[in-house]
Image (cartoon, rainbow, N blue to C red):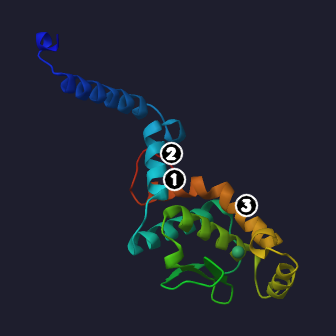
Amino acid sequence: MNHLIFLSENDWKAFLFGLLGVLLLYYSMRKESWQNPLFIIFFYFHLYRKVNEEEKLAFANATLDYCLRYIGQCKVKKPIIVFRNEKHPTALAIYDYESTRIVLFSPSHRTCKQIVDSVIHEYCHYLIIDKSNIAEYHRTQKQFKEPSINGPHEYLSNELAKKYYKDAFAFSLHKLGYCSLTRQF
Ligand SMILES: [Zn+2]
């Protein structure tokens, strides 16, 4: 029957998929970020894809920019992101309060999600920890069976990462020019 309208079955399939694509695109152009299905697909694709060393640094710095702008600042000088090409026995990343460095262990960070989580987590330490309370931090950490989850500082840092990672990553995608569908920051 298809020969009457000069399209084979495969042509019809291609035509319908194309039509669906055009409708999705049209619908998406009228919607902003989280209401936009194309943005959501794009967002999660980039969030969980593996990134190379250059991209790791770019996404980490963009996340740091987000933190400085939207999470809050303290009197201590701004932190610096550093990647180390080694694994730490217990941590994915650390905050060194003496040099105000956020150190990420590169082999433990393969996706953007891991990078964004770590930067926000360490940024929280940056806001809290200084010379005056570092001893207290270590003392309280020791009281918990799983200090990296249950210690008060760690708990707060993990919660902050959970709360902000989506917004921070949307900001990074926008800032780094990956996507213009995000809302204007
Ligand atoms: Zn921590």
Q: Is residue 157 left or right of residue 13?
A: right
Q: Which three-letter amino acid code belongs to the residue tagged 1? A: Ala
The label number, if any, that marks residue 183 in the structure image: 2
Relative to 78, is 117 above or below?
A: above
The residue at the point 67 percent across, 90 percent down is 98
Q: Earlier in the sequence, mark 1 or mark 2?
A: 1
The label number, if any, that marks residue 29 in the structure image: none
Q: Earlier in the sequence, mark 3 or mark 1?
A: 3
Instruction: Report if the CB atoms under discs 3 and 1 are less than 8 Å apart.
Output: no
Of circles 3 and 1, which is in front?
3
Q: Position of residue 70 (x, y in %)?
A: 63, 59
The label number, if any, that marks residue 159 in the structure image: 3
Q: Position of residue 178 (x, y in %)?
A: 39, 55
Mark 2 beta carbon near ligand 1 (under 8 Å): no
The residue at the point 72 percent across, 67 percent down is 157
Kindly identify which residue carries mark 1.
Answer: 170
Q: Which three-letter amino acid code belongs to the residue tagged 2? A: Arg
Residue 103 is drawn in which quadrant?
A: bottom right
